[in-house]
Image: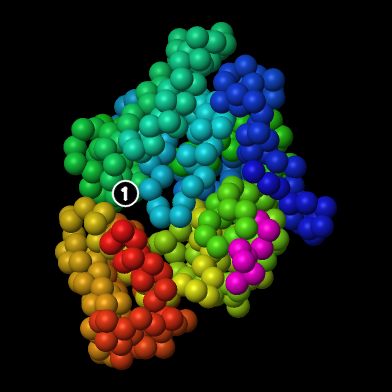
Amino acid sequence: MTSAGDDMTERSKLTPVLTRRWLSPTSWTIDTYLQFEGYSALRTALSAHPDQLIQLIKDSGLRGRGGAGFPTGMKWGFIPQGDQGAAAKPHYLVINADESEPGTCKDIPLMMADPHSLIEGSIITSYAIRAKQCFIYVRGEVLHPLRRVQNAVNEAYAAGYLGKDILGSGFDLDMVVHAGAGAYICGEETALLDSLEGRRGQPRLKPPFPATSGLYAAPTVVNNVETIATVPSIVSGGSDWFRSMGTEKSPGPKIFSISGHVERPGQYEAPLGITLRELLELAGGMSGGIPLKFWTPGGSSTPLLTAEHLDAPLDFEGMTEAGSLLGTTALMIFNETVSVPWAVLKWTEFYDHESCGKCTPCREGCFWLAKVLRRMVDGQGTPADVELMLDLCDNILGRSFCALGDGAVSPITSGIKYFRQEFLDLCTEQPGDVTVARPRQQAELAGAHR
């Protein structure tokens, strides 16, 4: 973990908040967490009225860290209150820890290094929305973080922070850690709920929304790991303190996952609004001094950007103005040795594999996009294939059942927008040619034959 240093601008300086415990020995234990004022925010929260906590999160401007950036306090406020209809049903909190997006790697390190921040945030959130049961849905393949979170939950129960009459407040909460079955689609909140209920993970038709008809058809809040882990610091520091970091519309600190062709890939905590140029300085610059060619601001489902966007602010508004999305702040950095069509093909094959098959545009569209791209990368495409792919993308975008289809077309349309000639150059190649345009593909093929 690294935060902005003295050489950065005042706006970019930050004392670590989310990652301040990460480098401590045994940071994942309750003893270490308590040494850093752990669970003190919970005591403060339990002394307040639930509605006050919801208003505090609204005032802080905290936005969902899972990709969509929806205002967290507003989402909590959608939960119906009262004694009739949906309000009379049990309320649930579900933590979306099914981190599966290519390039995204912030929630898993957080659960590994500091699971108690997630648990304390979950308890505070459950109290605020009047939920007495919380589920943490962790991607099944990440066994080590799964065990870390389960062990932390056990420690919290033993210390009296979970269970009956928490800290003598009269508030009861049970927490279940659930291992998913390994499907990218379950990162979509309604598909996650179906999976949690024991059904095949597929997105639901909305409305009704989870706030009124979520888990077991009861009012449910679904939040990302990083979002909930941020809550205790807001309760302790207050909304004004939280807004002192980041930008006006995108306040607070954020964990940026930097991978690819940089000297020091890893997790970097910085205020929202920092630029890639500043983050690259923190990461030691481009590896080998080879110039930047393209990058993703929020994982493979966000439109590609180029070196022209080095100074675009990494916040929700700044990325939209640049023609992309902030997403999960998974910055994948590619230098000039990488073929754009090759990289786009790899992502498209992922989406083709992970499509749940529920809707025709995504199921059929991703399949054909992958086939056309493979044909082009193998040197058997035609110039007409570029327009064919754009036409396929146009028939998927906004027409699929959930956002998976939209995410699948983003790297293709943006790749063609900035690097159309690179796609056209492939059309003149023969299958046996070895060209500079496809070094990564050649390396992959060579590795496969070893």
Report the quarter where the N terminus lies.
top right
| Residue placed most toward the observer, 323 or 127 | 323
| Residue placed most toward the observer, 83 or 171 | 171
Name the residue that disc number 1 marks.
184
Q: Is residue 78 rendered to the left or right of residue 195? A: right
Please determine whether, in this image, residue 31 is positioned above or below residue 122.
above
| Residue placed most toward the observer, 439 or 214 | 439
Asked if residue 128 is among those painted magenta in the image, a careful observer would answer: no
How many badges with numbers are in the image?
1
Q: What stretch of residues is rendered in magenta?
A: 283-290
Is residue 327 visible in this depiction of the protein? no
Report the quarter where the C terminus lies.
bottom left
Query: What residue is at 40 percent from the left and 62 percent from the top?
Result: 301
Q: Residue 346: horizontal and vertical position, in percent? A: 34, 64
| Residue 379 in which image quadrant | bottom left
Please determine whether, in this image, residue 238 is positioned above or below residue 277.
above
Query: What residue is at 20 percent from the left and 66 percent from the top?
Result: 367
Q: Residue 267: horizontal and vertical position, in percent? A: 59, 47
Q: Amino acid at mark 1?
A: Tyr
Please determine whether, in this image, residue 254 is positioned above or below residue 365.
above
Disc 1 secondary structure class: helix
Mainly helix, strand or loop, the magenta region? loop
| Residue 48 in which image quadrant | top right
| Residue placed most toward the observer, 207 or 235 | 235
Q: Determine crowd level at label 1: few under 14, some 14-19, many 20+ residues with C-alpha closer than 10 A.
A: many
Q: Residue 232: horizontal and vertical position, in percent? A: 61, 31
Identify the colour scheme used. Answer: rainbow
Query: What residue is at 39 percent from the left and 76 percent from the top?
Result: 438
Is residue 106 visible in this depiction of the protein? yes
- Which residue ends up furthest to the front in the rendered image? 450
Q: Is residue 235 rendered to the left or right of residue 295? A: right
